[in-house]
Image: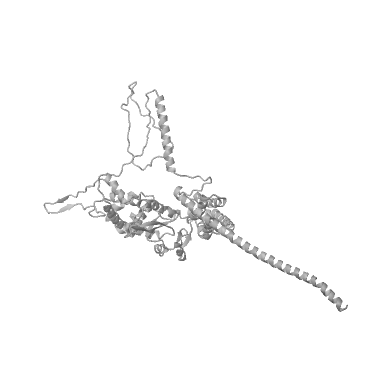
Amino acid sequence: MNSNEELLISHARTPLAETVQDLLAQIKNRDQEILRHQQELQAKQKEILGKNQDILARDAHIQRLSAELAHLKRIKFVQTREAFKAAGQDELFGDTLDADLAEITAQIQATNATTEETADTGNNPKTSPRKHPGRKPLPPELPRVEHRHDPDSCTCGKCGKDMVLIREDVTEILDVVPAQFFVQKHIYPQYACRGCETVEAVPSVPALIEGGMASPGVLTWVMISKFADHLPLYRLEQIAARSGLELSRSTMGDWVGRVGVALRPLVDRLREMLLQRNTLHADETPVRQLDPGGGKTKRAYLWAYCSAQWETGPPILVFDYQTSRQGVHAKNFLEGWKGNLVVDDYSGYKHLFATGITELGCMAHARRKFFDLHAQQPRPVTAQALTWIGKLYDLEREWQDVTVEQRAQLRQEHSQPLLVQYNAWLWEQRRNTANGSGLAKALDYTLNRWDALARYATRGDWPIDNNRAENTIRPIAIGKKNWMFVGSERAGVRAAAIQTLLETAKLNGIEPYAWLKDTLEKLPAWSNTRLDELLPLRPAIST
C-alpha cells in the first residue's frame, strides 16, 4: 500500500474515531449523571429515614402527653380506685347517685303509702314494722336504750279477758348525742384530829397539765378531732362556741403541744419495736409547711414505715416528718437495721440496698403503669398485662388465710411458674414496642425491677406490693385538704408522733378515742418501766 492509500484510509477513519470518542464521552457523562442521581437518591432516603424517626419520636411524645393528660383527668374527675373493668364502666358521682336513688325510692314509698291509706277503710292498727331486708344490723357493741310501747290496757276490748304476750316486734334505729361539755368538780375535804392535830386528805388526782382546766376527755377530744378527723383548731373553736363555751384555739394549741411531749416516749418505744422486725414497708407523701416571714409555704415530707402483714407480732406504724425527700432521711431512720424493705422505685431508697437491706418491689406500682395507659386508650396489650397481674393477685387473695409455710409452698407451685410466663411475655412485647412510647416505659419499669418485683414469690411472708404503706398515708392525704399546711417543722414532728399512735391503734383494731383517753389518764402516775403496757398494740398472734 502506497502512501496515498494510507492517507485516504486515515482521512476515512477520522470521522469514525470522533464518533466513538463522542459516544464514550456521552457514556461517561451518562454514568456521572446516574451516579449523581444515585447520590441524590441516597440523600433523599436518609432524609426520609430521618423524618420517619422524627415522626416516631413525635408520636411517642404525643402518646406520653396524652397519657399524662388522661391520668390528670382521671384524678380530677374519676374515682381513684383502680379497678380494671373489661367493659370500661365509669363510677362518677357515686354518692350523688345514691342520694338521688334514695330520694326517688322515698317518693315512691310515700306515694304507695298514700295510696294504701286511701284504700284502707278499716281501723286495725299496724302492729308489724316495715322490714328492711337490705339493711345491715347495727353493731352489737353499741349501747342500747330500750323503749317499750305497750298498749294502754292488757284486757281484750271485746270480751274483757286478759291478753297474753305472743311475740315482740323489735325495730332498731341509730341515734347520736353530739359532743356535750360539762364540768367535773373535784372536792378534796380535809379532816383534822382535835386530839393530836393530825390532818388527813385524799391526794389530788395527778393531771397531765398541772393547773389546767382540761380533763383527759377534753384533751382526747381535741387530739382525735385534730389528728384523726383532721379538723383545724378554729373549727373546734366554733364547735365549742355552739355549746356556749369560749375555747380559744391558742388554748387548744397549748394543750396539743403539752400532750405531744407527754406521748413522745410511747412513739420512741414503737420505733424501737418496729426496727426489730424483719420486713418493713416504706413510703412518703408531701405536705406543705409554712415558711415564716414570707407568708408562703414550702414542701416537706411525711415518711411512713410500717411492719409487714404476715410477721409475728402486732402491726406497728411510725411516721417520720422531714423537711425534704432526700434519701438520707430514710438512711437515718433505718440506721443499723438489716432486713427486707418494700418500696416503690424512688431513687432515695437505692443506697439502702448496698448496705445489706433486701429490696422488695411493689407490683401495684407496676400495675399502675399499665392501668393508666389502659384508662387512656384500651388496647389488647395493656388489657393482657392487667390480666397477668390480676392472676397473681387472685392467687394471693385465695391464700390470704393460710399459714406462712403453706403460702410459701403454694407460691412456689403456682406463682413462680406464672411469673416466668409473664416475664417472657413482657420481653416479647418489649421487642415489638418502639422506644420512648408510654407502653415502652411501662414495660421497662417492670423489666428493670423484675428481680425485686418477683422476689416475694420465693417466701411465704413477703408482701406482693407496698399497698400497706400507701393505705397508712391515705388518711394524711385526705387530711391535707382540711388543714392545708403545717405551721412549723416542730408542729410537723409533733403531728407525725401523734399520728403514729392513732394510726397504730387503728391497725390493731383498737378504738383510738378510748385508748388515748385511758392513756392520758394513766400517764401522769405511770412508771417508765411499764411503758409497753400503754402502747396501742393488740396481743401478738402467730401466723
Q: Is residue 381 left or right of residue 277?
A: right
Looking at the image, is 181 positioned above or below residue 491?
Answer: above
Q: Position of residue 52 (x, y in %)?
A: 59, 59
Nearer to the camera, 148 or 217: 217
Q: Can you say which quadrant of the picture contains the N terminus?
A: bottom right
Judged from this view, the residue extending furthest toward the top is 159
Q: Position of residue 474 (x, y in %)?
A: 41, 52
Report whether residue 542 is seen: no
Judged from this view, the residue extending furthest toward the bottom is 3
The quadrant in which residue 277 appears is bottom left
Q: Is residue 525 left or right of residue 3?
A: left
The quadrant in which residue 535 appears is bottom left
Q: What residue is drawn where x is 57% and y is 50%? A: 380
Nearer to the camera, 290 or 30: 30
Q: Position of residue 355 (x, y in %)?
A: 45, 66
Q: Position of residue 20 (x, y in %)?
A: 77, 70
Report whether residue 185 is seen: yes
Judged from this view, the residue extending furthest toward the left is 195
